[in-house]
Image (cartoon, rainbow, N blue to C red):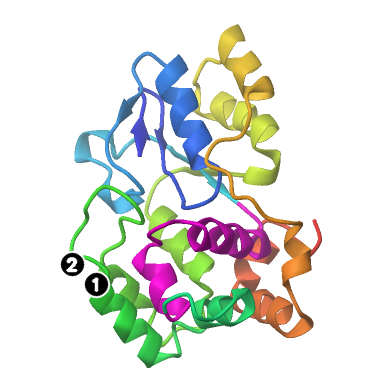
Amino acid sequence: MIATDHFVFLHLHKSGGTFVNEWLLRFVPEARHIGYHLPRKMIPPPLAHLPVVGLVRNPWSYYVSWFAFQSRRPQPNALYHVLSEGGRIGFEDTVRNMLNLGTSDRHLSALVAALPPEYINRGLNLPGTVVARIRGTSLGFYSFLYAYMYDGPGILHVGRMERMREELLQLFTAVGEPVTGPMHRHLLDAPPSNTSDHATYTDYYGDSLRDLVAERDGELIARFGYRFGD
């Protein structure tokens, strides 16, 4: 979470937020870091009147990026450890477990127990009590994260990560944040941050898993006009 005088930026997991955090802290003098992966409900009351800016990405792409990033870490986080059953299963089975968290008490209970009981301001920064709210829903995990991070009263501006460099300029214009020449040049020319090393995301999906993402994350996919293969 980055606060400026004109807006608050929320960092949705694996959706381009690291790049934006670094960019804002470098170029916006009044930008200040408040917390890591904190949701809208935790915006400090004196800032609650400000519009919220965030990013979203294609859910099919998200699951590949998340798996590729975590599976290569020396110590993957608890989410990966539980859903991959200690790294014993591959992408399709792990992501299927992720998509079925709302209906699989075995994986969800194990995950709730493995996550910290409160915010720790690093890593996933998602308490077990928060993840438990997915129980009994048919939401994909990315849709659950999106709602958890962004839902709330007030003005919300969300750009697509795939067009982040163009859409951020539009978002900042909408919230009244001046974009200087150096800011603009960095936005256009700087390399991505915190990327995952993987092949084209479509290569990871069989038909069944592709369709399950379409079902579980269907509302989010429709809202932002995503399609498999974009």
Q: Residue furthest front?
A: 74
The disc placed on residue 117 is 2
- Mark 2 or 1, closer to the camera: 2
Location of residue 86 in the rendering, given as x and y in whole percent from the top left corner: 42, 77
Read off the magenta span: 57-85
Tell whether label 1 touches label 2 (CB within 8 Å): yes
**Amino acid identity at mark 2:** Pro
First along the sequence among labels 2 and 1: 2
Using the image as rendered, state which of residue 33 and residue 195 is in the foreground.
195
In magenta stretch: residue 116: no
* Residue drawn at the location 58% of the way across and 9% of the way down: 182
Q: Residue at x 44, y 84 (%)?
A: 102
Q: Is residue 49 above or below residue 169?
A: below
Residue 171 marker: none
Q: Is residue 180 visible?
A: no
Residue extending furthest left?
A: 117
**Disc assigned to residue 129:** 1
Q: Residue furthest top?
A: 181
